[in-house]
Image (spheres, coloured by chain):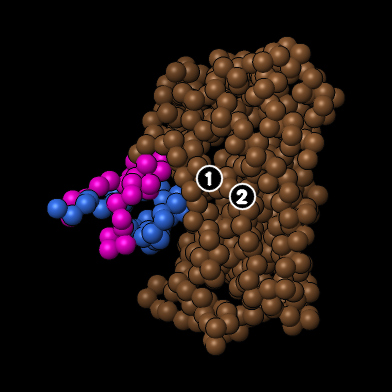
Chain colours: A brown, B blue
Amino acid sequence: MKYDVVVVGSGPAGSVTARFAAEAGAKVLMIERRAEVGVPVLCGEGISQKVDAYNILEGTRWIASKMDGARIFSPNGTMFKLAAEYAGSETGYVLYRDIFDQELARGAVQKGARIMLNTNAVDLLKKDGHIKGVKAQRFDETFDIEADIVVGADGVESRIGKWAGIQTTLKPYDLETCVQYTLTNIDWPSPYCDFFLGQKIAPGGYVWIFPKGKDVANVGIGILSSQSESGMALRLLDAFIAARPELRKGSPLRLIAGADPVAEPVESVRDNLLLVGDAARQVDPITGGGLMTSIEGGKIAGEVIGIAVKEQRFDAQFLSAYEARWKEAFGKKLHRNYVVKEVMLDMEDKTLDMLADSLKDYKFEEFSTLSIIKALVTKHPSLLVKLTPLMKLARA
Amino acid sequence: MAKPKALVRKDTCLACGGCISVCPQDAILMVTSKAVVYRDRCNSCSICVKTCPVGAIIWEET
């Protein structure tokens, strides 16, 4: 079995990479260790409407609901709204993520990629020190899959990167550990995705409520692993729900867990190898959202692979066009947001309350860094000190 | 006495992979949709135990 490309992992990053590589003429195999693409879901299921511009999804079956924006609740309950165009980076649609992933995989197959399920990559295949594919296991059978390029789209726990010598182990302060119920029979008729901040609510993270239409919503929590204790995420989520009658009356349809890298991007290229999506830490460190960046990264990866296959160039120098393009397209923003994450983690609940109080009457239609800082410090001058690191960033 | 080692309770694990991504020893793998600790590699650092969002990782006396 010889392919141009073997993609390890059939999540959005893998499927979009496979799609654009296949479309450019590459012979692509995508392997998936699970028995079904997109199952189990490991995600809050929010995505920006920017996804529409990619034309990679047919129909609307993957959409649970369309949102008007986001509401942010500070620790003392002060709320401010972000209209869709500004909250758009991670809210817009609430998805049926299993259907979404299967539609993206279907798109890759339509362009000529193949999928092999129940197939686990167990090591890189190397000859004379060069990567030549992956060793795979399917039930009791172990076999080689030869390919000129290996794509690690193997998620937060990526092993492909480690095998290629890329340091991907996350520090606990760079991981949000998450758990989420899908609740039915709740009374939360909000056209907004809601976010709740506070050290007691979700240390180093937030609780979210993403309505899915009818009386259903995803109610989840992410906390920073470095501030977590065993089972803390689930206990805090249960406490959040128990304290709210409109949620407490609900029943769970689903309980899932997730792990979200909120880290600096890693190196994503070696000879004969690329990393995409969560494996490359293509995730916004503030929101933990990674769907759009995975799709954007996957598209760039697929296009670069297409050229590499035509030119028969698989060395890191040639493939580094991928890294240069994604870092330019969104990597710089992820780095900037990593710095913002660190500033926000240092903020006490009191500071978050002051921020929310300053922003609650702010009209985000006039959004600009300068005007927002002006709005903040006019009402609460003491915020000036807290925000100094961010202002340095804005000038840089 | 040897230090206790991390052990994943299979009935509780939801296969999120968080423990694998933070293990400094590469001692955890996903096997048929459950995390499994390789005891000989575990150095009892407790990072995975604290990270698990549902409390599926416990200590096992050795």
Q: Quadrant of the N terminus of chain A?
A: bottom right
Q: Is residue A245 magenta?
A: no
Q: Amino acid at mark 2?
A: Glu
C-alpha span from label 1 to label 2? 8 Å
Q: Quadrant of the C terminus of chain A?
A: top right
Q: Which residue is mark 2?
A: A264
Instruction: Indicate whether A201 appears above or below A19.
Output: above
Other-residue count near label 2 (Cα within 10 Å), few / some / many at <14 / 14–19 / ≥20: many
Q: Which residue is mark 1?
A: A174
Q: Is residue A145 visible?
A: no
Numbered circle sitting on residue B32: none
The boundaries of the magenta stretch are B39-62
Residue at horizontal 72%, vertical 39%? Answer: A89
Residue furthest right as drawn:
A366
Magenta region's main secondary structure?
loop
Please provide percent x and percent y for residue A252: 44, 33
Please provide percent x and percent y for residue A255: 44, 40
Q: Quadrant of residue A236?
A: top left
